[in-house]
Image (tube, grey):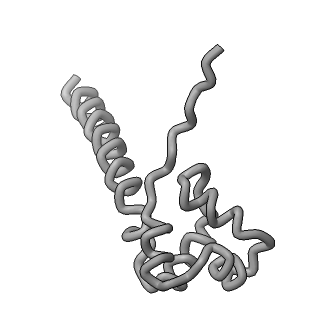
Amino acid sequence: MEKKRARRIPNLLKKYRRVRGLKQKDVARILNLKSPSQISRWEKGVCLPSVKNALRLAVVYKVMVDAIFSDLIRSLRDELRGREDEVMRRKQSHRND
């Protein structure tokens, strides 16, 4: 039986951490996390940090949150705009009935 591969969440956390010259262990200490393994999981895209931790990471890395998650935001924007267009078309067709 083949194991299904989990889809990774695209982010630039590792890039911005390295730009700041920090190790995962350093970031974990700054954020008061018990282990750097959580930083690793976020960087690998296994899971997302909470909103609070995403904001904290942006402060530590001296960037805006949308810079860290630019690819994710772009794909969400495309997906939601498509759904929004569909909803608006349906609304418009109901008005014309």
Q: For residue 5, which quarter of the picture?
A: top right
Residue nearest the viewer, comparing 28 with 23: 23
Q: Estimate the x, y position of residue 7 in percent, counting from the top left.
A: 51, 39
Q: Position of residue 24 (x, y in %)?
A: 62, 73
Where 7 sits versus 1, above or below?
A: below
Name the side, left or right, on which 87 lies relative to 4.
left
Residue furthest out toward the right: 34
The answer to whether 37 is drawn above or below residue 55 in the figure is above
Foreground residue among 23 and 79: 23
- Side of 91 where 73 appears, left or right: right
Query: Is residue 9 shown left or right of residue 4?
Result: left
* In the rendered image, the vertical position of residue 95 relative to residue 13, given as above or below: above
Q: What residue appears at the point 48 percent right and 82 percent down from the top-left corner? A: 61
| Residue at the image point whose x is 32% and y is 36% from the top | 87
Q: In this view, which residue lies farthest toward the left?
A: 96
User: The N terminus is located in which quarter?
Assistant: top right
User: In the image, residue 4 lies at what x, y percent?
Assistant: 58, 26
Q: Is residue 66 left or right of residue 48?
A: left
Identify the image quadrant of the C terminus: top left
Quadrant in the rendering for residue 73: bottom left
> Picture coordinates of residue 89 (x, y %)?
24, 33
Q: Decide which of 15, 73 is in the foreground and name it.
A: 15
Q: Residue at x 50, y 76 (%)?
A: 17
